[in-house]
Amino acid sequence: MSRTYFGTDGIRGTVGQDPITPDFMLRLGHAVGQVLRRDSARPTVVIGKDTRISGYMLESSLEAGFASAGVDVLLSGPLPTPGVAYLTRALRLDLGVVISASHNAYPDNGVKFFSARGEKLPDEWEQAVEARLQQPPQWVDSAGLGRARRLTDASGRYIEFCKSTVPHSLSLRGLKLVVDAAHGAAYHVAPDVFHELGASVVKIGCSPDGLNINQGVGATAPKALVQAVAEHRADYGIALDGDADRLQMVDAEGRLYNGDELLYVMAADRLARGEAVPGVVGTLMTNMAVEQALARQGVRLVRAKVGDRYVLEELAARGWQLGGEGSGHLLALDRHTTGDGIVSALQVLQAVRRNGRSLAGLLEGVALFPQVLINVRLPDGSDWQRNEALAAARLDAERSLGESGRILIRPSGTEPVLRVMVEARDAALGRRCAEAMAAAAAQV
């Protein structure tokens, strides 16, 4: 069954345009409530959100939709996406609902859901909701309407959870950290987590006004963090995105560390402690240098499709714990059921403290291969897989690169564009190979 509304990470779009409208959100809440009531006579859900001004409107609409289906609602207010996942599981609720468009700018918003176990829901569940949306509403009578109440201690509960993911012995005393919450959902949570573990904290991106989420700050705009670390002479900087499920870090020298490097640090730290790391899941875009570094330590990297959802599916299928993307979505499934920027930062800082080495020192010998990405607009009706010139150019590039690089050619999922990526130890060689393949791909 094809899906009309759900994408790879819930439902997302521009506020005021279908489906991100109050009338659709009311219908969505009602439809989800009807699906929940197949398994529970009186379900309870928690609704969290980031700091977009549209969150008020969408929250009210979803609340009304759930109530009309006989579902009780807890309202957490602004809370990171992984915080909602945690509360859903900890409070034994039936569903977690997050109103957020993650790293997008404020005109966008969306909704995503977590199961009672705090995990992403399967395709079958989303298909059941879509099917219910096509049916007439089934309003419950007045006596059966759902009730709503504020969960006043949501942020405090989540702060304590984050701290519990590292040993009680871990102290960040003596570290000066800049924490950038992207004016998003973690603005009142992330600084407190690191402060309560002993760090001296400088806050940036922690003054949301409903319109400034992800605006020039956060994990997708790390320049502000680099500048703040230098200005305050901090040891490290931590940047989250609008819903705090992705992470970028900066050291005192101004070096930026992406998700690939941080994932390696997490895996290497576990190995150093004698823990088993049977494998790590990355994506098609994970840097080859990280794959080779893990291999030198006897750890296999398996590549999933791009998207933390696919990384999570691969981890679950293999029974592994660690995975992530270069964008900063990192998964440590023995710490949390979903990607969590704060928890991931704590895992990295724990490695720094345990080993007595800087982040740069822990990554010594892991130099990321330069990547060249060229987008080629395809003519209407063209089939790049049957392009003989592209096939020949790719064969030439593979011969030139040998074991010192790799090639990834994939179509965009959102526009008629072919993405040609070459990753090579020799940047100039990588660019020549990418440009040759791009030129061949553009031939009709």
Image: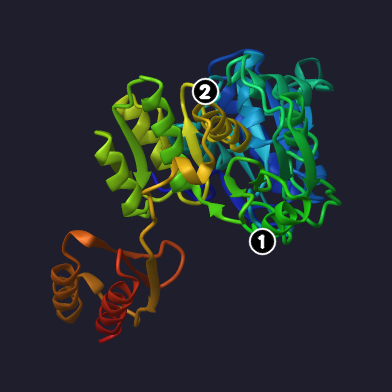
x and y percentages locating residue 99 in the rendered image: 69, 41
Q: Residues within 10 Å of mark 1 (few under 14, many from 20)?
A: some
User: Which residue sits furthest bottom?
Assistant: 444
- The label nearer to you, 1 versus 2, is 1
**Residue 149 as seen in the image, left or right of residue 401:** right
Q: Can you say which quadrant of the picture contains the N terminus?
A: top left
| Residue 299, picture quadrant | top left
Q: Which mark is residue 335?
A: 2
Task: For label 2, count other residues whose C-alpha is less than 10 Å away and answer few (under 14), some (14-19) or many (20+).
Answer: some
- Is residue 234 among what the camera can see? yes
| Residues at discs 1 and 2 in contact (Cβ within 8 Å) | no
Quarter in which the C terminus is drawn: bottom left
- Amino acid type of the residue tagged 2 in the rendering: Arg
Which numbered disc covers residue 223?
A: 1
Q: Is the image coloured rainbow, by chain, by secondary structure, or in one colour? A: rainbow
Residue 17, picture quadrant: bottom right
Task: Work out which residue is located at the far front of the displayed protein and give it.
Answer: 356
